[in-house]
Image: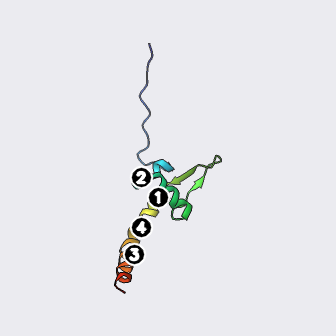
Amino acid sequence: MTVSTPPLPRPSRQLVFTSSQAAVYLGVSLATIRRWTDAGHISCYRTPGGQRRFSREQLDGFITSMQSDTPDRGRAHAGAARS
C-alpha cells in the first residue's frame, strides 16, 4: 500500500519564472520570449546551465512599459501612414 501526500501549496505570487512560465504569464509563445530577451526588450538572468530566469518584477515592469507605450506608438504609426 502506498500512501500519497497532497502536494504542498505553491505561493500565490511566484517570484521567479522559467522561460515557459514567463511566456504563459505574458500570454505569448516561448519563441517570442526568446526573441524579446535576445533583443533586450525583457531582461533576464541566466542560470549556471544557461537557462533564462525572469523575476516577477521584470515581467510586470515589461507589461507596464508596453501599456504606457502603446497609445504613443499607435499615434506615431498613424501619423506616419498619413504622411
Q: Earlier in the sequence, mark 2 or mark 3?
A: 2
Q: State the separation of the CA atoms marked 4 and 2.
A: 14 Å
Judged from the image, the secondary structure of the residue bearing numbered disc 1 is: helix
First along the sequence among labels 4 and 1: 1
The residue lying toward the viewer, choosing from 66 and 58, is 66
Q: How is colour applied across the structure in the image?
A: rainbow
Image depth: mark 4 or mark 3 in front: 3
Which label number is shown at residue 73?
Answer: 3
User: Is residue 34 visible in this depiction of the protein?
Assistant: yes
Would you say the residues marked 4 and 3 are in contact, meaning their CB atoms lie under 8 Å apart?
Answer: no
Amino acid carrying label 1: it is: Leu
Residue 59: give its label: 1
Q: Could you say which disc has been placed on residue 66 in the image? A: 4
Quick one: label 4 or label 2, which is nearer the N terminus? 2
Q: Is residue 8 left or right of residue 47?
A: left
Task: Looking at the image, tell me whether mark 2 or mark 1 is earlier in sequence order.
Answer: 2
Mark 4 and mark 1: Cα distance apart in space: 11 Å
In the rendered structure, are the residues bearing label 2 and label 1 in contact, judged by CB atoms less than 8 Å apart?
A: yes
| Residue 82 on image: x %, y % | 34, 84
Give SS at disc 3.
Answer: helix
Residues at marks 2 and 1, CA–CA distance in whole angstroms: 8 Å
**Residue 8 percent location from the top left of the image:** 44, 34
- At x 39%, y 75%, the residue is 73
Element assignment for label 4 = helix
Please name the amino acid that badge 2 sits on. Answer: Tyr
- Look at the picture and state if 24 lies above or below 3: below
Foreground residue, 6 or 53?
A: 53
* Eye-nearest disc, 2 or 3: 3
Q: Amino acid at mark 4?
A: Met
In the rendered view, tell whether residue 50 sits above or below residue 62.
Answer: above
CA gap, disc 3 and disc 1: 20 Å
Residue 25, labelled with which disc? 2
